[in-house]
Amino acid sequence: MTIKEIQENIVDEFSMFDDWMQRYEYMIELGKSLPLIDEQYKTDDNLIKGCQSKVWVHAGLDNDKVVFTADSDAIITKGIIAILIRAFSGQAPKDIIEADTGFIDEIGLKEHLSPTRANGLVSMIKQIKMYAIAYQTQLN
């Protein structure tokens, strides 16, 4: 699936819920299904700067696709990073770099987060794109 198709699926899933309490519960469930980062990667190098809670993101290259794993010490934040990893993991670096992140606004996530969590979300996206840029450079 392309990033756009995955993002459309995520938007569709979120549109099934009537209120934000249900959406938060769904995000918590998504966080529980997150492919967990190996403990050896829970280092300061993999810590997302600008997040209120601790979020670690690790990336590796597998068959020219970037594969992400992550973890967080906060359940909502874990759900947020799970959404991002679902959208971007297993994709080509070029596709991640060029991907639109408008689906975040479509599901209404930014407007329902505290300012510090919204800043953290932006930092997570930035870090995912930075990994993709690094791997794209490596592949060229």
Image (cartoon, rainbow, N blue to C red):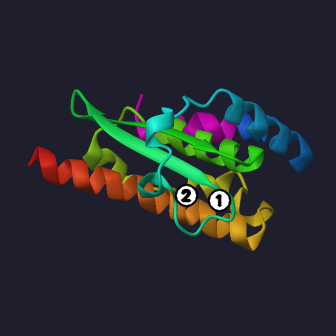
Crowd rating for badge 1 (residues with CA inside 10 Å; few <14, some 14–19, many 20+) = few
Where is mark 2, residue-wise? 102
Q: Position of residue 134 (x, y in %)?
A: 24, 54
- Residue at the spot 44% in from the left edge and 37% down from the top edge: 40
| Residue at screen point 26% across, 56% down | 133
Q: Are marks 1 and 2 in contact (CB under 8 Å)?
A: yes
Q: Position of residue 110 (x, y in %)?
A: 69, 63
Q: Which mark, residue 135?
A: none
Q: Residue at x 70, y 30 (%)?
A: 32
Q: Which residues are magenta?
A: 1-12
Q: Which residue is mark 1?
A: 105
Q: Is residue 15 above or below residue 137?
A: above
User: The residue under label 2 is which amino acid type?
Assistant: Gly
Pinpoint residue 65: horizontal percent, then vertical percent. 28, 34
Q: Residue at x 20, y 50 (%)?
A: 136
Q: Amino acid at mark 1?
A: Asp
* Helix, strand or loop for disc 2: loop
Q: Is residue 95 above or below residue 12?
A: below
Question: Which quadrant holds the N terminus?
Answer: top left
